[in-house]
Amino acid sequence: MIKNKVLDALVGMAVGDALGVPVEFLSRDLLRNSPVVEMVGYGTHNQPAGTWSDDSSLAFCLAESLCEGYDINKIAKSFLRWYQEDHWTPHGKVFDIGVATSQALRRVRDGVNPLVAGGVTEYDNGNGSLMRILPLAFYVQNMPIDERFEHIAMTSSITHGHIRSINSCFIYIEYILELLKGIDKMEAFQNMQKTVNAFYKEYSICSEHEISKFHRLLGNSITESTQIYEYPEHEIRSSGYVLHTLEASFWCFLKSMNYAEAVQKAVNLGEDTDTTGCVTGGLAGIYYGIENVPAHWVEALARKNDIFLLAEKLFKATQK
Ligand SMILES: [Mg+2]
């Protein structure tokens, strides 16, 4: 039987998200004194233990939509269903939404084409598309790289249309595709760097200036050879800026030995704890597998059975 990696991914993501929900916005200093080590409830959003946030809600909407093939209008509609009708919420009500996402979804509601609904300025680079992009990896995995990039760009642009957000999603998915090969995470990291750097060389999709923003992840700077996992913690930031989230997630994942360690590290960086937990949890879930996620964390997940059914459905749909 082929292992259901969609389940590893979705559960890894949602558990990391849920671990971070009660402490969202808390500072790193505060969490250093009382770190998150368990799945607890209440806190910032006053939600019971196991409650995942908008990050997982939107990723589940995307996953569900992809079961029927790729249709940008259907994906945008399912996001709108979450926003307006509480579809794929953990307990029947939206309790958390990013500014850029709500603005973009209101544009979609008002009839704007989803491809141009997201913000496109440099200031529109919150982590709101990165946090929900993971399920797309399973849909694009057998496509050539230019088609993968195109699908990632379209999917990000519903809420986040700037090239930096798109590139962040692209780097994350390219790394996931390497991890899905079942190779060592460091080897996968080097392969991702080679693939992405070669792609940027071949296709002039953005400026050198934009590419240079990712030098700590892509190892392509001529003046700086430090790899992301070699930086000390104080040089890793964990705000809601997409580049901070992406760097922090690679850092946490590459510097950990198991699932729990990776997501605890992520959440305890503070600030945007649920999203750093979610993005890190996706990588760690795929790499270590659901069997490495503490069983009582999986049990605690809101709508656990629905998540398992969704994973089964997307797995079947993307195996064809
Ligand atoms: Mg969130």
Image: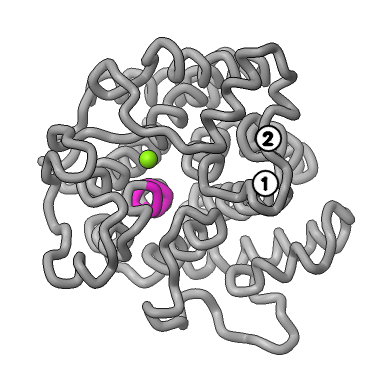
Vertical side of 161 occupied by 228: above or below: below
Which image quarter: residue 252?
A: bottom left
Q: Amino acid at mark 2?
A: Ser
Instruction: Give 165 or 194, whichever is nearer the viewer.
Output: 165
In x, y percent, where is residue 87?
A: 39, 14
Q: Quadrant of the C terminus?
A: top right
Instruction: Give 252 or 77, whichever is nearer the viewer.
Output: 77
In x, y percent, where is residue 86?
A: 37, 15
Q: Main secondary structure of the magenta part?
A: helix
Q: Quadrant of the N terminus?
A: top left
In x, y percent, where is residue 312?
A: 38, 22
Judged left or right of residue 180, residue 50 is left
Q: Which residues are magenta?
A: 275-280
Specify whether residue 145 is in view. yes
Seen at 59% across and 74% down, the residue is 216
Residue under numbered circle 1: 166
Q: Amino acid at mark 1?
A: Ile
Counting residues from the N terminus, which is met first, the one under dot 1 or under dot 2? 2
Judged left or right of residue 19, residue 206 is right
